[in-house]
């Protein structure tokens, strides 16, 4: 096994963020979500992505034991460990953009805290949609926040910005793409992106 720094970092993130079940789809989905976002965001490296969004994954800075284990492990130790070797294989596939993407094009994910911290969770406050019943591993109901965005123009008399034509409307910021183990995967809702002019990876 020849393991470069970016592959190790991605494997450690996927291994650390996933539950302890070592589910290939859960670990693979996280690896792919990270790699998908890095590719979409100007082809960033994993380190470049984390520098651009320091709060993207907490495993790298919150003392996550599984993340630390893989980051410190020798290549022989990784090869001998089912979960860690799986994470490395998933990271390699995700970085190469080869094989099937278990996350179905996701850029983000949430673990059990989505359920345990539901009322205060940022995605709940934004609004989310479970796109398929199979994604609803935490048995939650959609939360919608209907929002209309207007183009702005400057009033000739007052010089103040006022609403003009409707730019777009949306109910949700987040939409699920897949779920495995104790992880649910997300992208931004298409209507949200149209209404706000936002980037899919931001």
Image: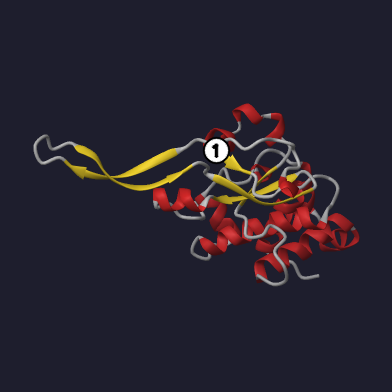
Residue shown at 72% from the left, 53% from the top: 14
x and y percentages locating residue 52 in the rendered image: 50, 51
Locate residue 187, reporting x and y percent. Answer: 58, 52
Instruction: Please tell me which residue is depicted at 89% across the width and 58% down the height of the picture.
Output: 82
- Number of marks in the rendered image: 1
Residue in front for this viewpoint, 45 or 5? 45
> Which residue was labeled with disc 1?
127
Residue 134 or 97: which is nearer the viewer? 134
Q: Residue at x 74, y 66 (%)?
A: 3
Q: Nearer the viewer, residue 140 or 27?
A: 140
Up/down of 161 relative to 135, above or below: above
Residue 89 drawn above or below residue 103 = below
The local secondary structure at tag 1 comes to loop
- Residue 92 sits above or below residue 173 on the image: below
Q: Which residue is at the far left?
A: 157
In this view, the residue in front, 140 or 198, is 140
Farthest residue in the top direction? 119
Is there any visible trace of residue 67 in the rendered image?
A: no
Image quadrant occupied by the N terminus:
bottom right
Q: Residue at x 72, y 62 (%)?
A: 91
Could you tell me residue 150's position as x and y percent? 32, 43
Left or right: 31 in relation to 191: right
Mark 1 nearby-residue class (10 Å; few <14, some 14–19, many ≥20) = some
User: What is the basis of the colouring in this image?
Assistant: secondary structure
The answer to which quarter of the image holds residue 162 is top left
Left or right: 99 in relation to 45:
right
Taking 112 as reference, is 76 above or below it?
below
Residue 33 appears at what percent x and percent y? 64, 56
Asked whether the viewer can see residue 1, the reply is yes
């Amino acid at each position: 096994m020849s393991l470069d720094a970016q592959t190790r970092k991605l494997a450690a993130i996927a291994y650390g963020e996933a539950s302890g079940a070592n589910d290939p789809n859960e670990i693979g989905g996280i690896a792919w979500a990270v790699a998908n976002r890095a590719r979409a965001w100007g082809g960033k490296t994993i380190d470049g992505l984390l520098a651009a969004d320091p709060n993207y994954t907490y495993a790298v800075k919150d003392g996550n034991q599984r993340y630390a284990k893989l980051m410190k492990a020798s290549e022989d130790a990784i090869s001998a460990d089912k979960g860690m070797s799986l994470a490395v294989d998933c990271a390699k596939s995700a970085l190469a953009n080869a094989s099937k993407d278990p996350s179905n094009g996701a850029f983000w994910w949430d673990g059990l805290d989505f359920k345990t911290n539901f009322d205060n969770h940022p995605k709940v406050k934004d609004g989310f949609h479970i796109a398929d019943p199979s994604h609803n591993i935490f048995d939650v109901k959609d939360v919608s926040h209907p929002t209309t965005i207007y183009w702005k123009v400057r009033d000739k008399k007052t010089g103040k910005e006022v609403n003009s034509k409707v730019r777009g409307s949306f109910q949700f910021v987040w939409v699920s793409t897949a779920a495995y183990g104790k992880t649910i995967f997300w992208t931004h809702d298409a209507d949200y992106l149209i209404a706000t002019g936002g980037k899919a990876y931001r």
